[in-house]
Image (cartoon, rainbow, N blue to C red):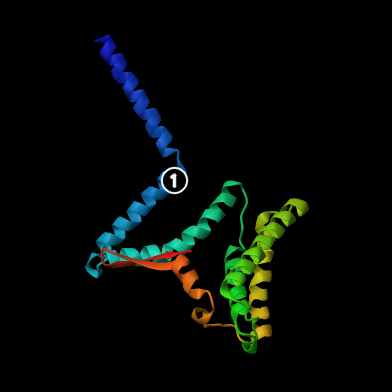
Amino acid sequence: MATEVAVATDERVRQTAFLGRLLSRPELGALVGLVVVYAFFAIAAYDNNFLSWTVTAAILNRAAPLGIIAVAVALLMIAGEFDLSVGSILGFAGMAIMVLVTPSEGGGFGWALWPAVAMALVLSIITGLLNGWLVVTTRLPSFIITLGTLFVFRGLTIAVTRLRTNRTQLGGLDDVPGFELAESIFATRISLFGGSFNLSV
């Protein structure tokens, strides 16, 4: 009898320890939050076809780009730092591609798409290195440094585009040489169960 009680007690201790370790993990809270929010909208918007694959595809298509950006931001936050300039750098990189591929008669540089993408990537990497160097050398909080970078690149995005093309909105990306290959790699669509899922980077 005493042996059975000891075994039962030992089993309860193991279960409690496992549950304690599980509850201490921050990703569990995110998962529970996701399930609760999804369940709420599945009940509240059931009549609007929320549980269909079409709506699921639309939600995931919107969430994927944010998730890609969130990975890098999460790594910084784990390290105790923060980057407020991510959104501005994203916009700047996109506009840099557009200015580089816009024909010279439209005020751009007339590049092909792949060299423009490579240049936007190089500019973004240099910006990240500059942010890191300023945080390390000045010992200012990364919040302050990247807040300044946010405003600088938001202004540069508008100023350079307007200076070169006299516009702030550029189009015609699908006419640029190399677009078909880039679209097939970075922006293909998969139809699954009646929903159209974007494979977007």
Crowd band around label 1 with a 10 angstrom C-alpha radius: few (<14), some (14–19), many (20+): few
As rendered, which of 104 and 59 lies closer to the eye? 104
Image x and y of residue 171, in percent: 53, 82
Q: Quadrant of residue 62?
A: bottom left
Residue 147 placement, left or right of 25: right
Residue located at (64% from left, 79% from top): 158
Query: Dot 1 lies on which element?
Result: helix
Instruction: Answer above or below: position of 8 versus 38.
Output: above
As rendered, which of 26 and 95 lies closer to the eye? 95
Quadrant position of the N terminus in the picture: top left
Residue 89 placement, left or right of 34: right
Image x and y of residue 107, in percent: 65, 86
Instruction: Answer above or below: position of 189 versus 137.
Output: below
Residue located at (67% from left, 84% from top): 164
> Which residue is the extreme one toward the left?
47
Residue 90 placement, left or right of 137: left
Q: Disc 1 marks which residue?
A: 27
Instruction: Answer above or below: position of 145 versus 103.
Output: above
> Which residue is the extreme one toward the right?
137
Residue located at (40% from left, 37% from top): 22
- The amino acid on which the numbered mark 1 sits, given as a three-letter code, is Glu
Instruction: Answer above or below: position of 190 versus 159.
Output: above
Image x and y of residue 44, in percent: 27, 63
As rendered, which of 161 and 101 lies closer to the eye? 101
Q: Quadrant of residue 125?
A: bottom right
The image shows a total of numbered marks equal to: 1
Residue located at (46% from left, 71% from top): 183
Image x and y of residue 142, in percent: 67, 55
> Which residue is the extreme one toward the bottom?
105
Q: Quadrant of residue 86?
A: bottom right
